[in-house]
Image (cartoon, rainbow, N blue to C red):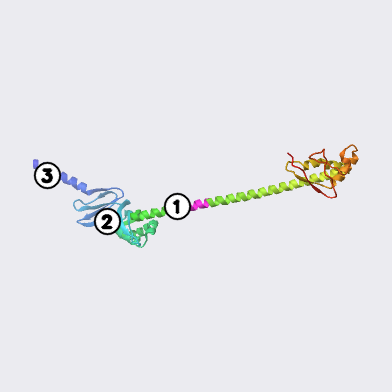
Amino acid sequence: MQPIIIVLIILVVLVFIALVKTIQVIPQASAAIVERFGRYTRTLNAGLNIVVPFIDSIRNRIDLREQVVPFPPQPVITQDNLVVNIDTVIYYQVTDARAATYEVASYIQAIEQLTVTTLRNIIGGMDLERTLTSREEINAALRGVLDEATGKWGIRVNRVELKAIEPPTSIQDSMEKQMRADRDKRAAILQAEGVRQSEILRAEGEKQSSILRAEGEAKAAALKAEGEAQAIRTVFESIHAGDADQKLLAYQYLQMLPKIAEGDANKLWIVPSEIGDALKGLSGAMGNFGPLGGGSTGFNPQNPGKGAPETGTGPERREQPPID
């Protein structure tokens, strides 16, 4: 009995193993390569698949999703003989599992080496400044070469990115100094432009202020002159309207003489010859005026009691003694 039980147990185990090898479940977005006696038979897609146990075997399981592979920094020489380190990132996707398995031994390593050689060819034709400012151009050229070369491997390169471009330390220091100098230059230019604009605006303001001030002074002078002219015209018309005689004019004339002699600095003043006629007319009108009756006496504003010098036919210059 025991040998039969052992045989049955072995048969059950073999059947279980055969079932396990017969039923193959492939996850979504994956594929499996099936070989029969070492030869490619078919590609298993996602889902439940049946294979012949102990005859068919799974060679490789491939992920069909888009993959991201970063490559380590690679030293590249530019056209002006400067060494820069460039980090790249490749986005690829397997489109043909059979080609990716049999056309290339390791498509990851092949893509990396192809990226390095292509990158060196592209950067070798550019100087450092163009390399630093032409990332899009480098990405497009690199993607075109990789996509063309990896098509027969069942690989599609969707995107290539330059993660970092690191020039030598000395070049970085020089670039930083140059950028700092450019920023200082732009700041100085902007400051000079601001000062210039400020001076222009200030000059324009002073110009407008001077023009407005001059216009105001001109209008004020015109109004003042017009007012004086109107006052003179009014006085003149009043005199003519009032029919002033010689007596009134002589009296007004005498009232103005003290104002002429006002001030301590008036050491010398002129007595007009017409003052005698005015005094004679006034003395004739006022019989009790006293010393004003004769033509040889006059009126001294500084000392009315003493009288003025004699008047002649023309103005005579008389010097008064200084007043203490």
Q: Secondary structure at mark 2?
A: helix
Q: Is residue 261 above or below residue 167?
A: above
Quarter of the N terminus within the rendering: top left
Q: Is residue 234 above or below residue 58?
A: above
Q: Secondary structure at mark 1?
A: helix
Badge 2 crowding class, 10 Å Cα cut-off, few under 14, some 14 to 19, many 20 or more, is few
Residue appearing at x 63%, y 50% in the figure: 208
In terms of secondary structure, what is the magenta stretch mainly?
helix
Question: Residue 72: x and y, percent?
Answer: 29, 53
The answer, for residue 244, to whether it is visible in the render is no
- What amino acid type should be assigned to the residue bearing mark 3? Val
Between 288 and 90, the residue placed more toward the observer is: 288
The residue tagged 1 is 184
Badge 3 crowding class, 10 Å Cα cut-off, few under 14, some 14 to 19, many 20 or more, is few
Question: Residue 252: x and y, percent?
Answer: 83, 41
Mark identifier at residue 109 = 2
The residue tagged 3 is 7
How far is mark 1 from mark 3, CA to CA? Answer: 93 Å
Q: How many marks?
A: 3
Between 78 and 37, the residue placed more toward the observer is: 78
Query: Which callout, 3 or 2, points to the residue nearer the camera?
Result: 2
Q: Is residue 189 magenta?
A: yes
For the magenta stretch, what is the residue range? 188-194
Query: Which callout, 1 or 3, points to the residue nearer the camera?
Result: 1
Quarter of the C terminus within the rendering: top right
Question: Residue 299: x and y, percent?
Answer: 83, 41
How far is mark 3 from mark 2, CA to CA? Answer: 50 Å
